Image (cartoon, helix red, strand yellow):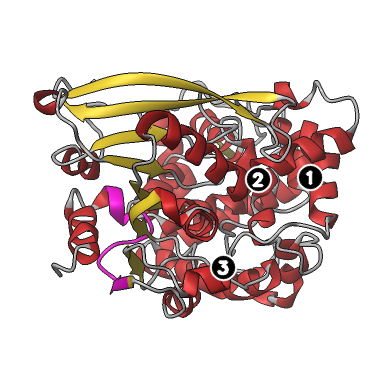
Amino acid sequence: MNPSYATVDHLFTVPLDHTAPGGETLQVFAREVADRSRVDEELPWLLYLQGGPGGKSPRPSAASPGWLAHAVKTHRVLLLDQRGTGRSTPVTARSAARFRQPSQLAAHLAHFRADSIVADAELIRRELCGDTPWETLGQSYGGFLTLTYLSRAPEGLKACYVAGGLPGLSATADDVYARTYPRVGDRVRDFYARYPEDARCLRRIADLLTTQDIRLPDGDRLTVRRLRTLGLLLGMGDGFERLHWLLDEALSHTGNGNGTPDAASTDAESTKTAWTNPTSTDTALTDTFLYQVMSLTGFTDNPLFAVLQESLYGQGAGPTAWAASRALPTFPDFTEDADPLLLTGEMIYPWMFDDIRGLRPFAEAADLLAQRTDWPPLYDHARLASNTVPLAAVVYHDDMYVDATLSLETARTIGASRVWVTNEWEHDGLAASGDRVLARLMALAGGRA
């Protein structure tokens, strides 16, 4: 914990279904953070809305992002674990298994979208602030939540800041993924231009997975399609390097021509051999690589990310119906036998709920959600057009996850909005920039920039 921060933990009881407040309840956790030197002052509140879906709020520490240190200079910050995440009655594979029928689980999960999260936030605001409005900071999906908040309860808001998260207000899941695949393909090609040897390495790994039954430490089979989901890393500022160094230790050489380890060779020697002779039949995947791939692609900590990803775009315009999966065949460069092998990004596919241990309890419920046709709208276009709450947003020109063109189209339709477009950072610019992004957003909202 950073000694300059004073923290208070809060736990709130909220209805699972805000339209039926007498029914099942959830616990929602939030952590109040203040500058220790100002803890007794009456400071305005800033609610932090994390990205996701399925992401919990950051935990304050000496390594906390610079935006938090900047925010507590003038505000009391509330780090909200959105329902189903962190310490807020978390949705996990274990909790999903308690539902006897997939339809029951699907009905439960339908209450974890933006409309419910905003209703939670309003209940919490009234408990902490009474009738006083607060400010919000939305990172990524937190920006989607912000526009739902402005649509449903603008009276609770004094000002809103959004980093990389202005959604297309009318964009369907099909619209989103038609735009997403080309952006991801370009990002993967940029990665290969920086690290040409990694293109050869990934193709070699894919060939191994095609011909061998290779298991992750939890018993799941590692397939080419699961390997390709590592492309999710590439949308962050450090993503190229994280993937590069993961691949740097991916391959080793067994050394004796029969597929079994050679005890006389060191790990360093076997790795060097695998790289200098990547077509060797004695090349194998290292335990280090397999463990990291399991962790990066297992959804153990955030199954809601996979379960609810496409439902973000469900607004009564027909089912989302596994839009990313349906779009994939229309992009021939993304075939599994392509060379170079193109990775995928934030796309969620139905096979994940069969192949990945942490998602299997959600399989049938996720399919029911994908077929649902009566999702309520999340955005009130008329109310957003007449909005008077200052909204300041940064749009990252090269954002791999959120389409910049859709974001700018949205910004033009919202009253009292000011937008800053930059290519200085990737999707994680709020954290990666120190205090620069938040400071400028606050200045924009206040008419000072």
- Does 349 appear above or below 107? below
Q: Which residue is mark 1?
A: 366
* Crowd around label 3: few <14 · some 14–19 · many ≥20 (10 Å): many
Amino acid at the residue labelled 2: Ala
How far separated are the C-alphas under marks 2 and 3? 26 Å
Task: Please state the extent of the stretch shown in magenta in the rendering.
Answer: 418-431
Q: Secondary structure at mark 2?
A: helix
Q: Is residue 53 visible?
A: yes
Q: Which residue is mark 3?
A: 340
Could you say where residue 280 lies in the image, as x and y percent from the top left? 58, 48
Q: Which residue is mark 2?
A: 306
How far separated are the C-alphas under marks 2 and 1? 9 Å
423 in magenta? yes
The residue lying at 38 percent from left, 46 percent from top is 242
Cβ atoms at labels 2 and 1 below 8 Å apart: yes
Could you say where residue 213 lies in the image, as x and y percent from the top left? 75, 38
Label 2 vs 3, first from the N-terminus: 2
* Crowd around label 2: few <14 · some 14–19 · many ≥20 (10 Å): many
